[in-house]
Image (cartoon, rainbow, N blue to C red):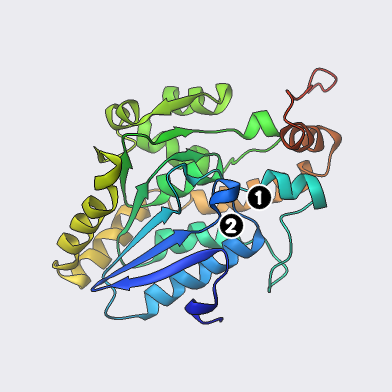
Amino acid sequence: MPRTTDFQDIRYQIDGPVAVVTINRPERYNAMRARTVEELVHAFRAAWADHAVRCVILTGAGGKAFSTGGDVKQRAETGDYGPSESGLFELDHLHRLIRELPKPVIAAVNGLAIGGGHVLHVLCDISIASETARFGQAGPRVGSFDAGFGTNYLARVIGEKRAREMWFFCRQYDAATAERWGLVNAVVPPDQLMPEAMNWATEVARMSPTAIRFLKHSFNTDTEHQAGVANLATAALDMFVDTAEGQEGAAAFAEKRKPDFTRFSL
């Protein structure tokens, strides 16, 4: 495991009982390549192993984006999400770590939470949003999908009708709507986002760590079967992105044009 000081795509900082993990690719709207995901995995494992850490805050660098998901430009350029130490794009592993980490994870959503970035905040235990945050899915527009936690668990959070709306139409929703839907716990002015997230984190850090651990595992029990669906969905996505239809979505995104899916049929 690399030292947390050696990270290139993220920042890892300890503030008292809180670990703050920041996706640090603002020039790509904090989109994730394989290296980014691998470093996030290492960061969450470091937070798990550190007995002094009682809570984790996940956020994005800059004011524009929390994360816009997988780096579609990278995918269009190389056909994958770039190299990593393991040779894998470990997004499923990252999802599992956020769920299984026996400490609360708070998403501080500072801007766009789109696609895979939206899935990340949904999987966090608590979400605090800036008033400037926007939420949505983009998979069908760019030739991708998350048929695992990104759909099943999202439906548990906001309901079937709204989850289907988010995925089928790829619209974006403001922070007030997200709070009304139960997608986020609180909305604050941009300059209050990290102080508010830190307030929540330090408050929960005063609770019994063993009680919090068992409570988190208990909350996860009802949706644990969705991990198997997520594995199946990832296998399907691996095949889909190599098809002409999947490549059209990525190419259109990179070329800043509307994708043409009219020649494809079920």
Asked whether, in this view, residue 86 is left or right of residue 246, the answer is: left
The answer to whether residue 228 is above or below residue 12 is above
Which residue ends up furthest to the top in the rendered image? 262
User: Dividing the image into 4 quarters, which one contains the C terminus?
Assistant: top right
The foreground one among 190 and 106 is: 190
Q: Nearer the viewer, residue 8 or 141?
A: 8
Q: Is residue 136 left or right of residue 205?
A: right
Judged left or right of residue 193, residue 28 is: right
Three-letter amino acid code of the residue under disc 2:
Leu
Q: Where residue 49 appears, x then y in whole percent?
A: 38, 80
Q: Which residue is mark 1?
A: 234
Circle on res. 91:
2
Mark 1 / mark 2, whichever is N-terminal: 2
The quadrant where residue 68 appears = top right
Q: Who is closer to the viewer here, 257 or 35?
A: 257
Indicate left or right for 49 with 84 as reference: left
Residue at the spot 51% in from the left edge and 82% down from the top edge: 3
Q: Residue at x 77, y 43 (%)?
A: 241
Q: Alpha-carbon distance for marks 1 and 2?
A: 9 Å
